[in-house]
Image: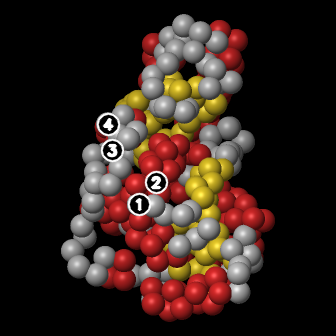
Amino acid sequence: MKIIRKTNELEQILVLIKDKGQSIGSVLTMGNLHDGHLSLIKEAQINNDFVVTSIFINPTQFNNETDFSSYPKTIDDDIAKLEKIGCDLLFLPEIQEIYPGDLLKQNIVNNFRGILCDKYRPGHFDGVTTVVDIFFSIIKPNASYFGEKDFQQIKIIQELVKIKNHNIKIVSCPSIRDDSGMSLSSRNSKFTNDQSKIFNQLGSKIYEFINFCKKKSSNINLDNFKKQILENSINKIDYIEIRNENNLDITNVSSKARLFIALYIGEIRIIDNFKLY
Ligand code: PAF
């Protein structure tokens, strides 16, 4: 696997690939790779001739310095995992390479904003769309693969490509889940044993509720479920909501809907979403 740190070097390599008429798939990550990321890379490999994975912990999408500096960094393991699955190229830029001047973020997308994570992490999605726009402009992939764990992020990135006229197919891939049914996440690697237990119990409670929603199908009320969750050693709930998966409007019917959650176990913020149909 080629490891490239400089934008101009990457661009030269990708021009040659494109000149050969080969398609490029990209998977943008912040590292600490787990099976969820690897499933995106495998999907990209199936559908493209050449796959670029990036690892870049993007400073502009964090809400505070501590969260940014404590983000898990496991670059040697990540490289070994990428080598093992035969990724073609890892783009591993320094901050200066992506943000040559100040760490500025732009407000590019306004749809799907003001709700869910955007309400609790102001500016986060401006940081995400700024960096994804920069990566798309450098890599110019034919398709880029994102995990449904970050469902709102995918919706916003789909808007980004329309607004910025990127000719890139955004491929949304199902979450890879652990035995308790929760999506894999880089943040879960920070759990203590006790926190892992709480996380697994949370999974059981959520799946009980999902089964209830599937049966009830309309007039679903979340109050009892939220109470139960708070009894389960959950520190804080940012949101537990049912929303239509197309327009992200609040709904109380299960058809085409997902349960969206963001909550804290200790200091670790968990986000996930679950189909209710
Ligand atoms: O989902 C992520 O890991 C990040 O938000 C992304 C898309 C790599 C942008 O930094």
Left or right of 34 in this view: 234: left
Is residue 141 visible in the rendered image? The answer is yes
In the image, which is nearer the foreground, mark 4 or mark 1?
Answer: 1
Q: Which mark is residue 164?
A: 1
> What amino acid does circle 1 point to?
Lys
Alpha carbons under labels 3 and 1: distance apart: 13 Å
- Residue 275 is situated, as x and y percent measured from the top left of the image, at 64, 30
Pick whichever of labels 3 and 1 is earlier in the sequence.
3
Which residue is the site of mark 2?
162
Determine the image quadrant of residue 266.
top left
Exactly how many numbered labels are in the figure?
Answer: 4
Q: Are marks 1 and 2 in contact (CB under 8 Å)?
A: yes
Residue behind mark 4: 114
| Residue denoted by label 3 | 110
The kind of residue tagged 2 is Lys
Q: Is mark 2 within 8 Å of ligand 1?
A: no
- Dots 2, 3 in contact, CB < 8 A: no
For the point 63% across and 90% down, the residue is: 16
Residue furthest right as drawn: 46
Do the numbered discs 4 and 3 sit on residues whose CB atoms are within 8 Å? no
| Of pointers 4 and 2, the one earlier in the residue sequence | 4
CB under 8 Å between discs 3 and 1: no
Q: Identify the residue at image location x=72%, y=70%.
A: 48
User: Badge 2: few (under 14), some or many (20 or more) residues near its Cα, within 10 Å?
Assistant: few
Q: Nearer the viewer, mark 4 or mark 2?
A: 2
Residue found at the very far left of the displayed protein: 102
Q: Determine the CA span between mark 4 and mark 2.
A: 20 Å
- What type is the residue that disc 3 sits on? Asn
Q: Amino acid at mark 4?
A: Gly
The secondary structure type at the circle numbered 1 is: loop
Quadrant the C terminus occupies:
top right
